[in-house]
Image (spheres, rainbow, N blue to C red):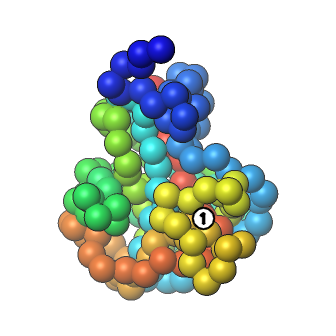
Amino acid sequence: MSYPPQANPHIETMFEASVSGRIFQGIPMGAISTFTLAIDTLYGTPLFVARRKSFSHIGIHVATLEAGKGARLGVFKMGADRLPAELIVDAGVADLTLAVSVEKALAPLILERGWYVPALVSDATGTAQLRSFQRAWSPWGWGSGLNIANQMYSKAQAYGALPDPFGVGAFGDYDTIYIGLREA
């Protein structure tokens, strides 16, 4: 059987199916928990796009709101070394005061097949929803043990405009902040 060059029947085809208007996370996720955001910390999570897609919004799910606080959201391209690299879009600040699920419009964002890193930096210490990768797989490998997958990459970053490039950070041995893209 022959497959087109942009489809891999073993892993990537499960990422090809998606529905317009729905939130896309790009990675198999499991259990839900929460995570306390650290002020002035840039967090990124891996996203695989299996085919060219257009996205209309980027968003996060916040478990604890904070009046007058925000999260700056954006998307980075993953570099050849599989680390977050160049900034593709800085979507601006999502207000963490008004709603539990917050989104920022994109104009639209078209992503080609490949790896990306949705990211956020916040001036809040509220809690964000975490999702765990299915423990059998992580694009960033395993950290301190076979039951702990590296699911988030972070670094110190002053709250404000997202940096370009992402810069040097560290892997975290914890679940990932749920940052989703809404398919247009």
Q: Residue at x 37, y 80 (%)?
A: 169
Instruction: Check the picture and name the quadrant holding the C terminus.
Output: top left
- Left/right placement of residue 102 relative to residue 45 reads right
Residue 55: x %, y % from top left = 42, 34
**The disc labelled 1 sits on which kind of residue?**
Thr
Depth check: 44 or 97 in front? 44
Q: Kindly tell me whether residue 68 is visible in this rendering.
A: no
- Left/right placement of residue 172 relative to residue 64 reads left
Depth check: 120 or 26 in front? 26
Query: In this picture, is 25 found above or below 99?
Result: above
Q: Quadrant of residue 86?
A: bottom left
Query: In this picture, is 29 found above or below 181?
Result: below
**Residue that extends furthest to the top in the rendered view of this protein:** 1
Identify residue for label 1.
Answer: 176
Residue 53: x %, y % from top left = 39, 29
Question: Label 1 neighbourhood size at 10 Å, few (<14), some (14-19), many (20+)?
Answer: many
